[in-house]
Amino acid sequence: MAIGGASKSNPDVITCGGIITCLARAGQWQHAQSILEQMKVWQIQSNCITANGVLSACGKGSSWIQALSHLFRMPGEQITPDAISFSAVISADQKPWPYVLSLLARLRCLLEPDVITYNAAISACHQPGGWAVALCLMEEMQAHHLLPDLFTHGAVTTSLERESRWDMALALAIDMRRRSMQTSLFVSSGLISACGQASQWTITLSILKQMRDELAQINEIFCGAAVRACGQGGQWQFALELLQDMADQDLYPNEIVYNAAIGALEGSGQWTTALSLLDEMQLRSVQPKKITYNTLMIVLGDATQWPLALSLFHMLPETLLDDLSSWSAAMLSCDAGLQWQLALQVLAAAPLEKHADAAEWRRSYGICMGACDHCGEWEGVLGLLQTLHEADISPDAAHFNLAISSCCHCCRQTSWKKASDLLAMAVDLRVACSITACNMAVTACRDTAAWQAALACLASLPQHRLAGDSTIYAAAMNTLGDVSRWQLSLSLFDELFAHQKTPVCDAACAAIFACDRGSQWETALQVFQRMSAEAAFPEVSLSTPGINACRSGRTGRVQLVACRKQILQIIRIHV
């Protein structure tokens, strides 16, 4: 928008304010800012109305940083921000909720926030982790004698919905009824959606029935959320009944409802019903979307109808193959049918140069790696991991965890070596593997008595940002016990006990076992006594390795009986 130089009759502040307001409604913050700058050329003093208009334009134009900048410049231009100013910035789209709290705190220093300001702040808390802040802000409103309205409850419910906090959303709705507040469609929709995401299908159906009893208006959004809840709860029959109920009430399902119904059939074996729903969509002139076909392919794959799933995939138009989601759905159907070779063929056909999203490629490779793993093809798993790395797409923790698991389960003879190498490769790529994967690697070392490798895996835990637990220490100690390295096993036990004060029965058993293999019955008894002294009570399961250790020692019968009595006496005291 080009603004010319000063003319013979320049507009006044009211005219400029009207133009800025119009631009604000359209979110044209750049043009609104140009008008504000031109006012300086025309020597027109800006006021709070024009400044708030620019703030509103920035907010609606998803430029919260510009809005924040304008807000902080207002005092320097002799304009005092008011509640509307802060509300406009707080209402800006895509801003992090911590900034909202900072603005709200600054507003409190100048004037008292009103309901509109709090509602704007609560609306900003839909981002991850913001639900607790939204609840606190609503409580703060009440502490300031401000009555939360329907918009407040709806905004809080939305933040709870996105975090699947269905229990709190339900408690909020119950509290509204206790206060004799009419539940709005906004609140009810968020509540049903929250329950649906948490697979709380019984509660979802109860809410829907209550709304019908109260003659509330029910639309496709409610029904879609209810269908989704039934599907996630494994109640595909109820999902189909809801679909039929919509037709009886002259409600026309849209593609979202149909997608939820088809998804509800996943794992049910009702693949023919899923195909009939696709036909029904086309008869009702409801255009299937990409997610419709992808969901249908997964349903077909779960029912071992992978040939139909692949046929459907090959019939998809090029416009629906603009990302890897459909390719991944086809791979999932192959995986469900244990067709790992076909999954690899689909992956190989996907053009890497066309789909540059690294996250999508990681997911697709993960699906194919899973398909190979399910068929015991650990070589394929490792090959895909290497190919992903060579394609300059760094594998993530899920890929390494799966590869380690596959090696440990499928290639027993060399599993410890491959698992150790994978852990080292993950460290080089700064990928943190899970404690489960590290434990499998250490356990694999025991099969071939590779105690040095077990210690190396244990030593790498900090590089994976992990703290060793009793299970992984016990696995390493058992490996040491197998090769009579009882001194090292006891060192690990001491190291674990120094960091973990709670009783560690499995590690204690491993330490006693190592002493047993090394004929160190006195040391084994000391471990048992230490456990009885440190713990609230010793595990009864420790008695067997303890007594065995005493039996294996080269002692006389009198000493053996005495040791056994000591152990059993400790157990009787604590159990």
Image (cartoon, rainbow, N blue to C red):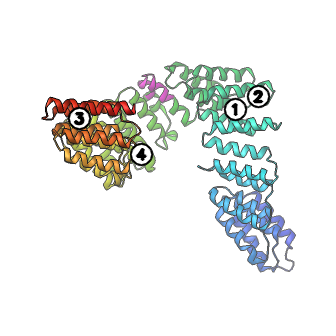
Numbered mark located on residue 211 in the image: 2
Say whether residue 14 is left or right of residue 58.
right
Mark 3 or mark 1, which is nearer the start of the sequence?
Answer: 1
Q: Position of residue 447 (x, y in %)?
A: 20, 36
> Does residue 562 show up magenta in the picture?
no
Instruction: Give above or below for 500 relative to 5.
Output: above
Give the alpha-carbon distance from disc 1 to disc 3, as whole Å. Answer: 51 Å
Res 363 label = none
Residue 80: x and y, percent?
A: 79, 72
Q: CA distance from mark 2 to mark 1?
A: 10 Å
Name the residue that disc number 3 marks. Answer: 411
Name the spot of residue 37 as percent of width and height, x first.
74, 75
Q: Residues within 10 Å of mark 2 (few under 14, many from 20)?
A: some
Q: Residue at x 37, y 39 (%)?
A: 347
Which of discs 2 and 4 lies nearer the camera? The answer is 2
SS under mark 2: helix
Mark 3 or 4 closer to N-term? 4
Q: Amino acid at mark 1?
A: Phe
Quadrant (top left, top right, bottom left, bottom right) of the C terminus: top left
Q: Which residue occupies 67% across, 33% down?
A: 192
Crowd class of label 1 (few under 14; some 14 to 19; many from 20; radius 10 Å): many
Is residue 394 toward the left or the right of residue 162 in the image?
A: left
Residue to which mark 1 is pinned = 222
- Disc 2 + disc 1, Cβ < 8 Å: yes
